[in-house]
Amino acid sequence: MDNKNKRVIAILGSTGSIGTQTLQVVEEHPECFEVYAITANKRVDELIAQARKFKPEAVVIADETKYEKLKEALSDLPIKVYAGYESICQIVTSGPIDVVVTAMVGFSGLRPTIEAIKAGKAIALANKETMVVAGEIITRLAHEYKVPILPVDSEHSAIFQSLAGESGNQIEKLILTASGGPFRTYTASQLEDVTIEQALRHPNWSMGAKITIDSATMMNKGFEVIEAKWLFGVEAEKIEVVVHPQSVIHSMVQFTDGSVKAQLGTPDMRLPIMYALSYPTRLSSSFERLDFGTLGGLTFEKPNFETFPCLRYAYDALAMGGNMPCVVNAANEVCVAAFLSNRIKFTDMSRIIERAMQSADFTIKPTLDDYFATDTEVRKMAESWI
Ligand code: MN3
């Protein structure tokens, strides 16, 4: 990549963990990237600071009550200011944008991602819920509009990197590594009394609150299995999860000759973000290196599906197909928010998700509208049980 070939990017969810790290990648290589648009949900002060620093063409705040403040704070700069969810869905279609980094949280990522694909924009996919909910539609649209979906999730980036140069070669198995989260060694009864603070203390990765809780329940890994199925076209039976507490191997691919390829690195999200944005080129970075001399052992163990039932529910949902992954996602979003606001216990989350799977209307061939209806229905249902 060179100056004449700057990639023009839009970052949805620029004030979140992935969003701010994406901007750090831009700072690392200003000659390669140009920020066209940034959007945030409601963190208006952070958005103002980012806009003043990176001077994008446009900024969008989803929370319309924050519009006046944002507009006022940027009034001395030639930056277009918009508000509302609809504006986010529109801004991604802007002509100059090459890549849309989808880094917002949850189901809300679905519509802007679809709009971006239909406008022919490459997707740097950080919002895994989009793939969990509607992987079938997203992959079909990406194929139809000839749009690449570049994984930002570290496991999927590792698989993507391991597959470089392997086109045409058969995959025997994808092996997703999991840190196991803060409660890896806990028993089911110990899990009953864990606190929000404990659940938010991830051993290796620094991430947003939603995904950190998902990591603690291992729902995150379950979602990554679903994400891997759609990104790489590999059936669930061929996707294995292995717990690897050091988070040095980010995931692996086993080929039909028995050979296994892995990608290793420090647990730093800027690495997969940068690879997604510069693909197929690798850019230099000042990030920390692995030091094998001091690394010590790498260990592996089987995941515990009894203690962490959310992982099992994700496999079950994938096997059932239809709108079932959407059901699990909606129930999970409600549960994580309820846990984070101290309204339910940690172990209530999996109980409510299981109940939602048993109670929701099942549709085997959902349309996009069906996904929205399922999401609304399940949220209402799960809220009523809390
Ligand atoms: Mn991940």
Image (spheres, rainbow, N blue to C red):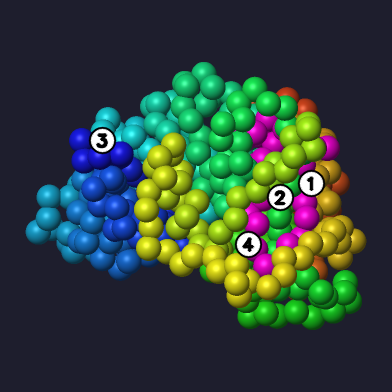
- The image position of residue 136, as x and y in percent, is 65, 29
Q: What range of the chain is rendered magenta? A: 226-251
Q: Which residue is mark 1?
A: 240
Q: Quadrant of residue 334?
A: bottom right
User: Which residue shows up at 46% across the image and 43% down it?
Assistant: 276
Spatial distance from mark 3 to mark 4, Cα to Cα?
A: 33 Å
Q: Would you say residue 294 sits in the magenta stretch?
A: no
Ranked by sequence position, the earlier of labels 3 and 2 is 3
Spatial distance from mark 3 to mark 2, Cα to Cα?
A: 34 Å
Tell me whether circle 4 and circle 1 mark residues in contact (CB < 8 Å). no
Ranked by sequence position, the earlier of labels 3 and 4 is 3
Ranked by sequence position, the earlier of labels 2 and 4 is 2
Q: Is residue 68 visible?
A: no
Disc 4 residue type (three-letter)? Val
Judge by depth and name the residue closer to the eye, 374 or 163.
Answer: 163
Q: Which residue is mark 4?
A: 248
How many neighbours does mark 3 have within 10 angstroms: few (below 14), some (14-19), or many (20 or more)?
Answer: few
In the picture as drawn, the residue positioned furthest to the top comes out as 144
Tell me whether circle 2 and circle 4 mark residues in contact (CB < 8 Å). no
The disc placed on residue 5 is: 3
